[in-house]
Image (cartoon, rainbow, N blue to C red):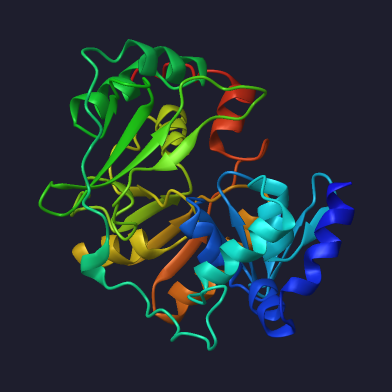
Amino acid sequence: MRQRTDQKKFWKFTDEEMETAKNTDLPDLLEHLGYHLKRSGRYYTTQEMDSLMIKERRSWKRYSNGTGGDAITFLQTFEGKGFREAVEYLLDFNGRARDSPAPSRPRPPPEEDERPEFALPPANGDNRRVFAYLRKRGIAPQVIRAFLNSGLLYEDKKYHNCVFVGRDGSGQPKFASKRGTYDKDGVSFKRDVLGSDKSVAFPIPCDPSVPWVLVFEAPIDLMSFCTLHREARSNAIALCGLYEGGLNRYLKDHPHLNHVVLCLDNDGPGQEATERLRAEYEGRGLKVSTRTPSKGKDWNDYLQTRGPPRERGR
């Protein structure tokens, strides 16, 4: 009945209004709604739904269930909006009032100083849940302690999430990514803290005597690699997605680095990004190599499949 009712109301929108709603820029819309986008070659996907692919910025498809459409159907499917409500929302998003006789000017892109003020979530009195969660994921106790002690990780007070803190070259926190400590049906809460600077992402300290940097998608993958390779204690960054802004800043802050080691996920988006970034950084004159886990989707999958590494007396 709802679908039939929505179709009856369709005539209340002009052709121009319908075109405006349907042709809404989906990456811009999803960021506005709080999703975290990842570039994958010619497509976009999100941290929240890896099976969602956005093509040509105007259409989407979710391969896990075969659904797809435009901006209107996205709001209907994932935001629970009716047809009329979805179109009204998109007209407003595009800066056009429903009863306005003429379109308003397009909204300019937000300036840097319009970014919401960044503030770390209040810390819990201890880190027990974070420690237990990461141990369950196979991360070595000494690796967890090292990240906690260096101020790169803590447990938030309200929800007991893992908070991965990205610090700039002066040691000031500029970015934070929250990860839930409770996975439901294999899905965990993931979200960047409001106002985070994605160009900082999640780096660990750089050793000036080492000429390379390891690049991961997620902090847990970086920690998994540190668990598997105990000598890996510096010169690494987690992009917290597939946006390379954090790597660009790391290379700028540490100009002696001449070798990029891409350790991205062993899936379609990860490997497409690997090829894209390889071409980009080789074009800058840097040496680029790759390391991919032999099993599983990412380094944490591989760690859990392989089991904890044996002590080698190092």
Residue drawn at x 61%, y 30% is: 187
Give the camera-side residue of 19 and 34.
Answer: 19
User: Which quadrant is home to the C terminus?
Assistant: top left
Q: Is residue 159 left or right of residue 266?
A: left
Q: In the picture shown, does residue 119 fall above or below 179?
A: below
Q: In the picture shown, does residue 56 fall above or below 26?
A: below
Q: Is residue 88 left or right of residue 116?
A: right
Give the camera-side residue of 219 and 197.
Answer: 197
Q: Is residue 77 left or right of residue 196?
A: right
Q: Is residue 50 visible?
A: no
Give the camera-side residue of 207 and 98.
Answer: 98
Image-quadrant location for residue 169:
bottom left
Q: Position of residue 190 (x, y in %)?
A: 48, 37
Residue drawn at x 33%, y 32% is: 163
Q: Position of residue 33 (x, y in %)?
A: 50, 53
Residue drawn at x 67%, y 45% is: 80
Image-quadrant location for residue 11:
bottom right
Q: Position of residue 93 (x, y in %)?
A: 51, 68
Q: Position of residue 234 (x, y in %)?
A: 28, 43
**Number of numbered discs:** 0
Image-quadrant location for residue 211:
bottom left
Q: Is residue 3 left or right of residue 202?
A: right
Residue drawn at x 57%, y 71% is: 91
Q: In the picture shown, does residue 274 fall above or below 129?
A: below
Q: Is residue 67 visible?
A: yes
